[in-house]
Amino acid sequence: MPDFPLTRDTPLLIVTSPLHSKRVALCFRKAGFTNFRMITHYVAVKPDPRVREQRASVFPEFQSSGKRYDDPINRVRWGLNTLLTTMREAGAILVYKWKGYA
């Protein structure tokens, strides 16, 4: 329990994913909270590419798989996953509005 009184005007910082942010904002507004901000993503600093080659496993028998993450199949899979998650979230927003949660 916080040491300060939590009111609907208390400043809140909500951390969520970009896909869930719309539904979260609707729910907080419906609950009467007026002073909230959302953190939905961050930008990571790209590491020096030489660092990857310098890393070594502590297990002597370890063999790298050589898997590449810029593979077109992975990109299609990730895009499909994002599309399906977006569709699910849009459906959830409709259900929340229909049931009166948002």
Image: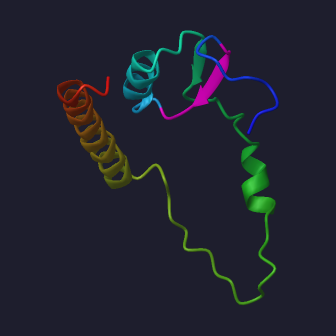
Q: In this view, does 57 lie to the left or right of 101?
A: right
Return the x and y of residue 78 as percentages of the image width and height.
Answer: 36, 47
Residue at coordinates 77% horizontally, 50% vertically from top-left? 50
Return the x and y of residue 15 as percentages of the image width and height.
Answer: 59, 32
55, above or below 97, in the image:
below
Which image quarter holds the C terminus? top left
Residue at coordinates 40% horizontally, 25% vertically from top-left? 27
Residue at coordinates 54% horizontally, 9% vertically from top-left? 34
Q: Give the range drawn in magenta.
A: 10-17
Is 11 included in the stretch rendered in magenta?
Answer: yes
Which image quarter holds the N terminus? top right
Return the x and y of residue 48 as percentages of the image width and height.
Answer: 76, 43
Choose between 60 and 14: the one closer to the eye. Answer: 14
Residue at coordinates 49% horizontally, 54% vertically from top-left? 69
Q: In this view, does 82 lie to the left or right of 16?
A: left
Q: Is residue 64 left or right of residue 24?
A: right
